[in-house]
Amino acid sequence: MGARQICTSYLLLLGALGAAQPALAQATAAPAMPTAEQTDPVKLGWMVGSPPPPEKVIRWADGSFYSFPKFRWTFSHARQFGATSNISRGLAPPSLLPRAERADIDAISFIPLGKSEPMTWAQSLPANFTDGIVVLHRGKIVYERYFGALAEDGQHMAQSVTKSFFGTIGASLVAEGKLDPNAKVAQYIPELKDSAFADASVRQVLDMTTGLKYSENYADPNAEIWSHVRAGSVLPRPPGYLGPKSFYEFLKTVQKEGEHGGVFAYKTVNSDVLGWLIRRVTNKSVGENLSERIWSKLGMEQDAYISIDTEGTEFAGGGLNTGLRDLARFGEMMRNGGSFNGQQIVPKAVVDDIRAGGDKGNFARAGFATLPGASYRNMWWVLNNADGAFAARGIHGQTIYIDPKAEMVIARYASFPMAANPFNDPTSLPAYQALADKLMAVTR
């Protein structure tokens, strides 16, 4: 199979990487597609049997692991399709998430963006191919549901929600004085002295305002994104492949286009540079940092795991897999200014900086139509709305949505057919706001 054929096979992938391809999403109407019920991975019987029938087998080598509807199963079983490393929760007991479940959430009504007919919260879940969702209000679970292949004791691909974990760690290292936000990347990573990142600052990497010759146009088989994911073993390599064979090898090849520090440009490659920066200044892998700084301190229920390349380097741009309630715990900590269970996990100044957001003008020029007035800071999406909401976002509908005014955290895993979030935002963002309004109304 040639490189062009492999690229074509993975157009539904649209990453494992980014939150959206805005121009593409704005220009493309969502195509007709089967429903969540029709593509339920359990009912379709993927990978069931000893061995499964040939028509029910999902493989990495032929790309079927990332084709719809098969990825509705693989998103909850990613460890079976590639090398990973473990993110330990430590040996302490898990932290308690008390319950105060509500029966009135499913009936909440809202108008999807661009529509005139109302939809209920319950209807929005299959519309977004939700695999699991947890809602916290004031630190208590008020709503929790699982669908398809995801169970409460399972783990799911976080996709680019991964970036926000490492953006938080990177910003924490800045607050601790271990990373200088104004220093050039090459000061820490001289191996990148001949790449586009040599004269980019740490801050520009954190906020994705780097000027790079790097396209994430997934419809273009020659886009640099394909070289990136093949180098990191996110996708199989074609026969005779002679390109970079690791994430770090690929980073050395990225060239400059334009100037750093201008328009926000969402490019996953920045996250892998950040991962290298974290590793260089701490002398620990990003997985070890995540375990020591976040996972073991929050009292997570489950270990997490993260995809690695052939050199054992973690995919800082989108390789994390976690339990759903653990995703909610992280969101609750961020909602509380970096504090959880009486312990300051992340410096409050870091959370305050994220919530303050980045340059709105730079963000607006990037063309994310479903996020008017938003910005980007430390690899978090900041909505700049009346509630001060901010979010971690990943393709196919992964999210941690934090509404400080409503004292609400939503953690959702999904397997939406189209990767770009502008396809599912119209029934996600207004649903989140309607729930926030409901929670605020009943607690006033």
Image (cartoon, rainbow, N blue to C red):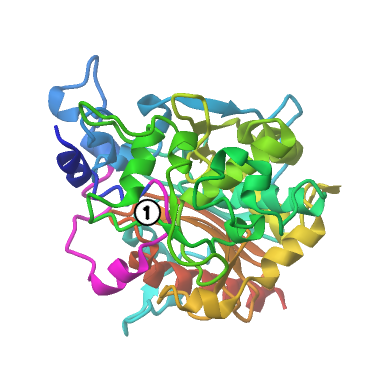
Residue under the point 51% across and 74% down: 363
Q: Main secondary structure of the magenta part?
A: loop
Q: Is residue 234 visible?
A: no
Disc 1 is placed on an element classified as helix
Q: How many marks?
A: 1
Q: In this view, does 351 lie above or below 195?
A: below
Residue positioned most to the bottom:
116
Which quarter of the picture shows residue 85? top right
Which quarter of the picture shows residue 120? bottom left
Which quarter of the picture shows residue 411? bottom right
Q: Where is residue 159 in the image (x, y as percent from the top left)?
A: 45, 47
Foreground of the two, 366 or 38? 366
Q: Position of residue 320 (x, y in %)?
A: 51, 39
- Position of residue 379 in the picture relative to residue 338 (left or right): left
Q: Is residue 361 visible?
A: yes
Residue under the point 45% across and 29% down: 309
- Position of residue 113 in the picture relative to residue 139 (left or right): left
Q: Where is residue 232 in the image (x, y as percent from the top left)?
A: 41, 34
Residue type at mark 1: give it.
His
Residue under the point 14% across and 32% down: 1
Instruction: Look at the image and give the residue range highlighted in magenta.
Output: 16-40
Q: Is residue 307 above or below residue 358?
A: above
- For mark 1, what is the residue? 396
